[in-house]
Image (cartoon, rainbow, N blue to C red):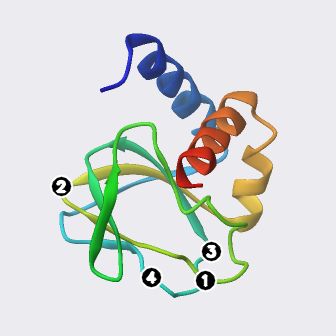
Amino acid sequence: MRSAEAVGSDRACIERAREVMDEITVPAGTTLIREDARSFDVYIVIEGTATISTRGRLIGYALSGDVIGATRIPGVGTKDAAVVADTTMRLLTAETGVFLSALGLPEVTRTIAKAIARAL
């Protein structure tokens, strides 16, 4: 469970990221990232949950404030895990170029660094 401070900083990150990223809504069952597929998209979860798995084995869940698809440089190589929406999800999304411009926002950079650290 996250602390109130962590949730607050995630909200600040989401608000700043909206300046450069698009908001979308996807239904439950939507595959956001396919394992071993090249992906150019990065997502920040606003609402909802997604299951993260590799080779059919559960790795974890993506929750509000989490960054999906940022454990590698977007568009370079393939993804190591599949991510499927468990619920209807509201997400911020961007392709590689837009996402890289978002890295200039300190709150977004910190959230991404945390996601990468958790994935290691």
Q: CA distance from mark 1 to mark 3?
A: 10 Å
What percent of the width, then of the height, locates residue 87?
Answer: 18, 55
Image point (46%, 16%), residue name: 8
Residue 70: quarter of image = bottom right
Name the front one of labels 2 and 4: 4
Which residue corresponds to mark 3?
40
Secondary structure of the residue carrying tag 3 is loop
Name the front one of labels 3 and 4: 4
Name the front one of labels 1 and 2: 1
The kind of residue on which mark 3 rests is: Phe
84 with respect to 102 (left or right): left
The kind of residue on which mark 2 rests is: Thr
Is there CB contact under 8 Å for labels 4 and 1?
Answer: yes
What percent of the width, then of the height, locates residue 22?
Answer: 53, 52
Task: For the N terminus, give its image quadrant.
Answer: top left
The kind of residue on which mark 4 rests is: Glu
- Crowding around mark 1 (Cα neighbors within 10 Å: few <14, some 14 to 19, many 20+) is some
- Crowding around mark 4 (Cα neighbors within 10 Å: few <14, some 14 to 19, many 20+) is some
Q: CA distance from mark 4 to mark 1?
A: 8 Å
Residue 76: quarter of image = bottom right
Nearer to the camera, 48 or 6: 6
Image point (62%, 45%), residue name: 117
Q: Any mark on residue 78, and which?
A: 1
Residue 34: quarter of image = bottom left
Which residue corresponds to mark 4?
35
Image point (76%, 44%), residue name: 103
The disc, 1 or 2, on the residue closer to the chain's N-terminal end is 1
Nearer to the camera, 27 or 32: 32
Q: CA distance from mark 2 to mark 4?
A: 20 Å
What percent of the width, then of the height, locates residue 4?
Answer: 38, 12
Image point (66%, 36%), residue name: 108
Task: For the C terminus, give its image quadrant.
Answer: bottom right
